[in-house]
Amino acid sequence: MSEVEKKLKEFAEYLKKINHYTTAGNLMYWDMTTGMPEAMAETRAETLSFFQTEVHNLNVSPKIEEFIKFFESHMDEFDYTYKRMTKQLKKDYEKQKRYPEEFIREFSLAASRGEVAWEKAKNASDFEIFKLALEKIVELTKKSIEYKGYKDNKYDALLDDYEAGLTVEKLDKVFGELRDGIVEILNKIKSTGKEIDDSFFHKEFPKSEQESLCLKLLDIMGFDFKRGRMDETEHPYTIDMTNKDVRITNHYYENDFTSALFSAIHEGGHAIYEQDIPDSLEGTGLNVAASMAIHESQSRFYENIIGKSREFSNYLYNESVKQFKGQFEGVSKEQFYKALNKVTPSLIRTEADELTYSLHIIIRYEIEKLLINDLIEVKDLPRVWNEKYKEYLGVEPTNDKEGVLQDVHWSDGSFGYFPSYALGNLYGAQMLHKMTKDVPGIYEEIGKGNLQPVHKWLKENVHEYANLYDPSDLIKKITGEELKAKYFLKYLDDKYKEIYKY
Ligand code: ZN
């Protein structure tokens, strides 16, 4: 074995050790949300914080510095993958190294406590219950920006965590175009005066039957149940131990047909991505997703582009009629499809239609920018939130639960994450444009409930690249172009023109 081979093997072993901690931590997080006894909350927060601190220490140890030095001195012997591995390792090391151990401990404790406080506040619909915990998280987030450093806008430092290289300057431009395009389509829809009836989605749908249909859909998507499972939590999410254990969670509402169903499809999109990460990248640290926006592109691709397409809707209609006996009597395929795609500006992001969804994200993005740049304070959030909803969507929350408390993200300090959802929409539509060129007749297969060609294309063009490319390079590699808003806007316009006949 050469010296280089020996070092690579040693590095792979070292990464394994880090993975043992992250696997244990993720599993404990999953346990915390799926049924841990309430009295354990504070102790579990400490345990999770312990694991995160250990991972941090392993990531910034002199051993890592030694690996980087060695790999850098052998770059000319490396292929693309090992060169990328070295580059990413150094980037992460330099980023992590800026945080003192004590800060990592404090932040992860605040995040676990924040989530508990948020859940209580949301249930009571009272922002005051969450305010103190959130103030702490915002204070620590601002501190993290000072450690990281930034050039123009403080918020850039947060964006970079989720989408490497993304800045406020770039995002303002993209989101500006997106907002104008959406508002234009929304106005066209309003001008038709058409109202779509979706009342048949709000009858009684037994939880166990919803679950059966969710499992069936995950199965046709290609979710591998030998490498994953689905459980129940307050908020649906996906978490992976490795590509061999990817867990998704769901939440059921008996009077809402679409909520759990499309959550399952959404989380399934995330999960398949994780399950498809190739084993061959183990030991390089590159066996992770390209970015959170690419992750959201996969989940939202399945949820909306596929899940709410006319072809899939026809398939879903047939399955739903079979699953829920009598529930859809008198409802035609056409009514079912239109109801799935009904546009109504609303208060809750996760229940928003495909058109207005991105406006929910733009609102959060603008609020986060204000907060991080000290232009508003935590106490102002409920007011600013309500004002923006009125301005952008013409609706106003009557309480905190349907307003500022609806999302979990701020409670664990995930500032800078929200833009990933809207970017995911853009990535997804641009990918669709290429996919339909590559695989003519793909929609016919979707109509039969055969999602294998979709999965195959995404696997070969997105999933298997894992973190071999930065997201901006990946989209160029896949589609030959930089990320553009025009594909998503054209997709939306084509779709709603046909539905609303404007
Ligand atoms: Zn998601």
Image (spheres, grey):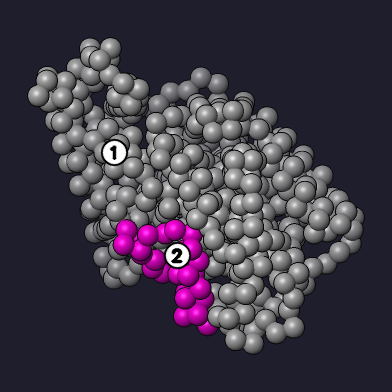
Q: Is residue 421 above or below residue 353?
A: above
Label 2: few (<14), some (14–19) or many (≥20) C-alpha neighbours in 10 Å: some
Give 463 or 252, whichever is nearer the viewer.
463
Where residue 327 appears, as percent x and y from the top left, is 64, 84
Instruction: Please provide the residue range marked out in magenta.
Output: 206-234
Q: Which mark is residue 280?
A: 1
Q: Is residue 270 visible?
A: yes
Give 89 or 276, whichever is nearer the viewer.
276
In the rendered structure, which disc, 1 or 2, sits on the residue that comes first in sequence? 2
- Element assignment for label 1: helix
- Most extreme residue toward the left is 1
Q: Amino acid at mark 1?
A: Ser
Q: Which mark is residue 299?
A: none
Q: Which residue is mark 2?
A: 219
Q: Is residue 366 visible?
A: no
Label 1: few (<14), some (14–19) or many (≥20) C-alpha neighbours in 10 Å: few
Where residue 281 appears, as percent x and y from the top left, is 30, 36
Residue drawn 36% across and 44% down?
277
